[in-house]
Amino acid sequence: MTALRAGELVGFPTETVYGLGADATNAAAVARVFALKGRPADHPLIVHLAGIESLSWWAATVPPVALALARQFWPGPLTLIVPKAAHVLALVTGGQDSVGLRVPAHPVAQRLLTAFGGGIAAPSANRYGRLSPTRADHVRDEFGAALGALLDGGEAQLGLESTIVACLGDTVRLLRPGVITRSQIEAVAGPLSAGGAVPRASGDRAKHYAPQTPLELLPTAALEARAAALAGPDHRLAVLAMRPPRVALPEVTWIDAGDRPDDYGHSLYNHLRSLDRGGFVRILVETPPDTESWAAVRDRLQRASAATT
Ligand code: TXA
Ligand code: MG
């Protein structure tokens, strides 16, 4: 890919969300990713690879458990944190001695990575702290002219960022829940270590993945009453729920996103993006069940509401 070789940035689709990519061995290009996103320098980037063969070039050592997870889930929505090889730029890893690696499954990402031949350092293609993009026009809206190229791969199939698993020392930890669940990871890796002193865990700042409209999480039974109490002619209100409303609520825009975690996750950022443009005073969100299949959605919603509640 000529743009990447020339040190330019490329917006590209993956099955999770769109990425903002740079040649991972080009320090100036990687620095532009941080500048464009407004991302703090100590917040590491994931290096995207065409296939599992390159894992050992980027890692100082490949823990057997990391290899087993890569064999099971790559290409796919799993990022592995492993000890970094000496040549991996400190800029990419935020100065840490580990590196995040992922082989995306999206055919357009696969073609780009195969043609380029190297690693592509890419965060989600959104400004720091904002919602991840699930469509090419989201990336165009946010970064348009600053990109060397923008590849349109249609709407991201999964719509939520990859599951992140750290395989460091003797421990295996889940740093960010995603579509690949904890049990799926444990089926390969055995029981995971509890959280704790993980260096710079994913999204360790509470407010992340957030719309600009205040977002409030509520139990299902509280939705109608809270909506009725807050809504008014000058206070248009949005509700993102897993069911239809039980009473008529004028001045309330009610989105029933359904009660299936995959469909809900697929459209979550899209819904929040359009609600963000709707001039609402607040978005009320029904808290999803505390079950494993909802873990990724719950995680993103809790972060999105962190600044509000
Ligand atoms: O699905 C995804 O993972 C998307 C697509 C584009 O691949 N990428 C993505 O990147 O979500 P980003 O930068 O928005 O989130 C990656 C997270 C960050 O929170 C970062 O802190 C964490 O991964 N991360 C990367 N390398 C790490 C490392 N060495 N140790 C701990 N966390 C790391
Ligand atoms: Mg991100």
Image (spheres, rainbow, N blue to C red):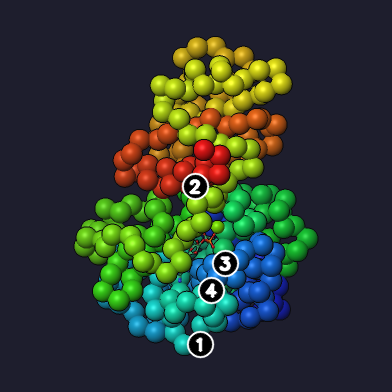
Q: Amino acid at mark 3?
A: Ala
Q: Check mark 2 vs ligand 2: CB closer than 8 Å? yes or no.
A: no
Please give the name of the residue rendered at 51% of the width and 21% of the height, measured from the top-left corner.
Answer: 226
Within-10-Å neighbours for mark 1: few <14, some 14–19, many 20+:
few
Q: Which mark is residue 66?
A: none
Please give the name of the residue rendered at 68% of the width and 32% of the height, measured from the top-left corner.
Answer: 278
Q: Is residue 124 above or below residue 239?
A: below
Q: Which mark is residue 87?
A: 1
Report how far apart the C-alphas of labels 4 and 1 lie in the structure: 14 Å
Regarding mark 1 in the picture, which secondary structure is present there? loop
Q: Amino acid at mark 1?
A: His
If you read the primary sequence from the N terminus, does the residue marked by circle 3 or circle 4 appear first? 4
In this rendering, would 29 be left or right of 14?
right
| Residue hosting label 2 | 303
Report how far apart the C-alphas of labels 1 and 2 lie in the structure: 34 Å
Q: Check mark 4 vs ligand 1: CB closer than 8 Å? yes or no.
A: yes
Give the camera-side residue of 98 and 217: 217
Write down the quadrant of residue 228 in the picture. Answer: top right
Within-10-Å neighbours for mark 2: few <14, some 14–19, many 20+:
many
Q: Amino acid at mark 4?
A: Gly
| Residue hosting label 4 | 94
If you read the primary sequence from the N terminus, does the residue marked by circle 2 or circle 4 appear first? 4
Residue 292's spot in the image, x, y percent? 31, 45
Please give the name of the residue rendered at 26% of the width and 53% of the height, measured from the top-left corner.
Answer: 183
Ligand 2 image-quadrant field: bottom right
Q: Check mark 3 vs ligand 1: CB closer than 8 Å? yes or no.
A: yes
Q: Quadrant of the N terminus?
A: bottom right
Q: Can residue 256 be seen by looking at this rendering?
A: yes
